Amino acid sequence: MEICINFGGHRHCFFLPIYQIPINWGKPGPDPHNYPALFQDAMILAAVSNVAKQITDENVRKSVEQGITAGFQAAQKHAGADVSINPVARG
């Protein structure tokens, strides 16, 4: 990612590295047959949801949270009625 700021008649650009831990649940299966990547997708959504709490700008944070909610809803729809996805972790 790159952010550029025009300041003092000059353009200053900053490269921001993206930190990503590889997430791989392994080979899909045996269930659910209709959504073999369910656990991998759910882990990524949960991780992004947790990190989104650190976004300082309220409008940006709420926008990201809405996207995460839509992602969980899409995963639930894809997984079907026999699967229950609860994005709130229990410890």
Image (cartoon, rainbow, N blue to C red):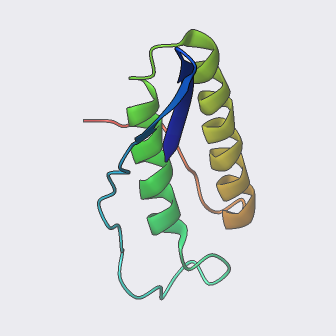
Q: Quadrant of residue 24?
A: bottom left
Q: Residue at x 67, y 38 (%)?
A: 67
Q: Position of residue 3 (x, y in %)?
A: 52, 35
Who is closer to the viewer here, 33 or 67? 67
2 displayed left or right of 91? right
Q: Position of residue 70 (x, y in %)?
A: 71, 42
Who is closer to the viewer here, 39 or 56? 56
Exactly how many numbered labels are in the figure?
Answer: 0
Q: Position of residue 29 (x, y in %)?
A: 48, 86
* Residue 3 against residue 83 in the figure, above or below: above
* Residue 22 against residue 89 in the figure, above or below: below
Q: Position of residue 89 (x, y in %)?
A: 37, 37
* Residue 36 against residue 84 in the figure, above or below: below
Q: Residue at x 32, y 67 (%)?
A: 22
Q: Quadrant of residue 65?
A: top right
In the orientation shown, which residue stands out farthest toward the front? 9
Residue 28 can be seen in this image: yes
* Residue 39 against residue 8 in the figure, above or below: below
Q: Residue at x 65, y 37 (%)?
A: 69
Residue 88 can be seen in this image: no
Who is closer to the viewer here, 41 or 16? 16
- Quarter of the picture containing the C terminus is top left
Who is closer to the viewer here, 14 or 31? 14
